[in-house]
Amino acid sequence: MLIERVNIISNEEVAHNIWQMCFEAPEIISEYKGPGQFINILVEDSWSHPLRRPMSIASAKNGKISIIYKIFGDVTNILSKKLPNDNIEILGPLGNTFTNWNVDCYPILVGGGVGIPPLLNLKSECENYNIDHSIVIGARNATEHFMTHEPENDIILTTDDGSFGELGTVMNPIDRIIKEKNSPYIFACGPEPMLVAIRDYALKNGIPAQLSVESYMGCGVGLCQGCIISKNNKSQKDNSYHEQYSLVCLDGPIYEAEDIKFEQS
């Protein structure tokens, strides 16, 4: 884990309010372990926005890192105004990685909302190792998609309103792919309702699944204790904090589906 001041190479809008930024980060890359890790970005050197913001790594190669983010508020709006040759300070790489995607399975990569970047990163790794896989990306409508719907190439996009790709959520394509493929293994990142649905489906049907959990973070290194998630620990004691909860920034963001509980599940 390092702090590095990096130079921005590009920062472009790829869909409505969704941006992709690329920057040179050779020191961070030197400690990078694989898809699923993230960085924490300090968008400006002022007390106006003193906390770093977690961003999943969408790609990491040749000394460069790219991220994909959506404009939600002041901080991401400031980030979208950054220009090539501007510099920002980042902390990373942080978190764990997806595992077992290259071991006797058929990876099904599932992303939704701003949870797409780590799946694009994992897709690139699958392609590098010539591993057959499918990717399913969900969004509310066509304006939030920046990929091409290519079911013939196992790239499936869905929209809640049917304005692009398949009508509905990611669950129908997931179910269809699982029935068609041997040894399916789900790797997912996205909004909590989507992860809850995938977790429940995976546990009910005995399908292995790894979930990359999105969480608000104050520090990214475990000090603030703000990014907790409940653990599914049957042996936990009522008063044992560490048996009941996990810190997403240190233990995650990726968990096996059976190891965690969501508040709404």
Image (cartoon, rainbow, N blue to C red):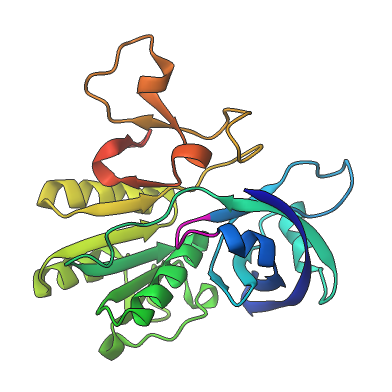
Q: Residue at x 30, y 12 (%)?
A: 237
**100 or 72: nearer the eye?**
100
Q: Give the main secondary structure of the magenta stretch.
A: loop
Q: In this rendering, does residue 41 appear at all? A: no
Question: Quick check: 242 left or right of 64?
Answer: left
| Frontmost residue, 149 versus 258 | 258
In which quadrant will I find the C terminus? top left
Kindly identify the residue that appears in the image at 81 percent across and 44 percent down.
Answer: 49
In this rendering, the answer to whether 36 lies above or below 234 is below
Query: Residue 1: x, y in percent?
Result: 62, 48
Taking the magenta stretch, the answer to whether it contains residue 175 is no
Camera sees residue 142? yes
- Horizontal and vertical percent position of residue 239: 38, 9
Q: Is residue 150 positioned above or below 24 on the image?
A: below
What residue is at 44 percent from the left and 38 percent from the top? 251
Extreme-right residue of the structure: 46
Q: Position of residue 103 (x, y in %)?
A: 22, 65
In the image, which residues are magenta? 32-37
Q: Is residue 16 left or right of residue 156?
A: right
Q: Residue 264 in the image: state x and y as whole percent.
A: 35, 36
* Tag count: 0
